[in-house]
Amino acid sequence: MQLDIRTRVVILCCVLALAAVYGSSQDSPATPSATPPVATRPAVTIAPVTATPATPTAAPAATATPAAPAATPTATPRPARPTATPASGATPAATAVETPTPTLTATPSPEPTATTGALPLEALPRIEFVRADGTVVSLPIEVPARTEYGIGLSGRYELGERGMLFHYEEEGRRSFWMKNTHIDLDIAFIGADFVIREIFGMEAESLEIRRPDDVYRYAVEAPSGWYAANGVQVGDTARFAFVLEDYPLE
């Protein structure tokens, strides 16, 4: 049988090894030795380690180890406080400008009028005038309290077909004027005997003080021209178509 080269080399190595072992056993005393097994891995020898006493050192303080590298804390900047920025074309801040104080104009208060002016025409009493021919004409009249005599028919701008009676306890020569009276009037002055003594025409807003020459007890103001239009004149008589005492003096 023909062997291959590799097998031959292995056999040769084995023969040489046996020869070396045999020769060595002839020269040295027999010492039991362990025959190393073929193809056995050399045993690993662990050298003893002499423990060196540890030098005591200060134990480090316990430190929390973060799972991830600790981030260096940095101050988080606060958002900047918004600053009002005028919009494009915005008007700049208002500047105080001195405003002139307006001149106050006094508003005149309403002129006072007699309370009897609120009465409707049909509610007014009447005075009758008897002409020389016996014809009787009448005029609705207001009969104010004497506390309103100073007002009379002033403060009015129209009168219509009505008049006003002023009456006194005794005859006398009392004066009239037209201050704040905005319409022309006629006044008949009547004595205690109810006879017309005088008739005056009075101009609106005139400050002229008028007084009859004769004494009288009653004065009847009428629209301007009323006496002439109704044929009433000096010497004619008057009578009340109502009870005068029913109207308070004050």
Image: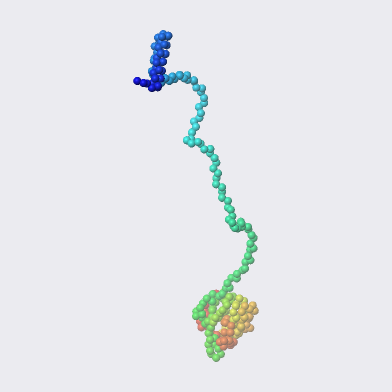
Locate the N terminus by quadrant.
top left
Count of numbered circles in the view = 0
> Where residue 37 sits in the image (x, y, percent)?
38, 18
Q: Residue at x 41, y 9 (%)?
A: 26
Please tell me in which quadrant of the rendered image residue 19 appears.
top left
- Compared with 76, 21 (above or below) is above
- Which residue is the extreme one toward the bottom? 133
> Where residue 114 sits in the image (x, y, percent)?
55, 75
> Where residue 77 sits in the image (x, y, percent)?
55, 44
> Where residue 229 sits in the image (x, y, percent)?
57, 87
Res 243 seen here = no
Q: Nearer the viewer, residue 20 or 38?
A: 20
Q: Nearer the viewer, residue 90 or 130?
A: 90
Quick check: 211 left or right of 74?
A: right
Q: How is the image coloured?
A: rainbow
Q: Residue at x 54, y 81 (%)?
A: 160
Please tell me in which quadrant of the rendered image residue 206 appears.
bottom right
Q: Nearer the viewer, residue 206 or 62?
A: 62
- Which residue is the extreme one toward the front? 2
Q: Nearer the viewer, residue 12 or 209?
A: 12
Q: Residue at x 48, y 36 (%)?
A: 68
Locate the C terminus by quadrant.
bottom right
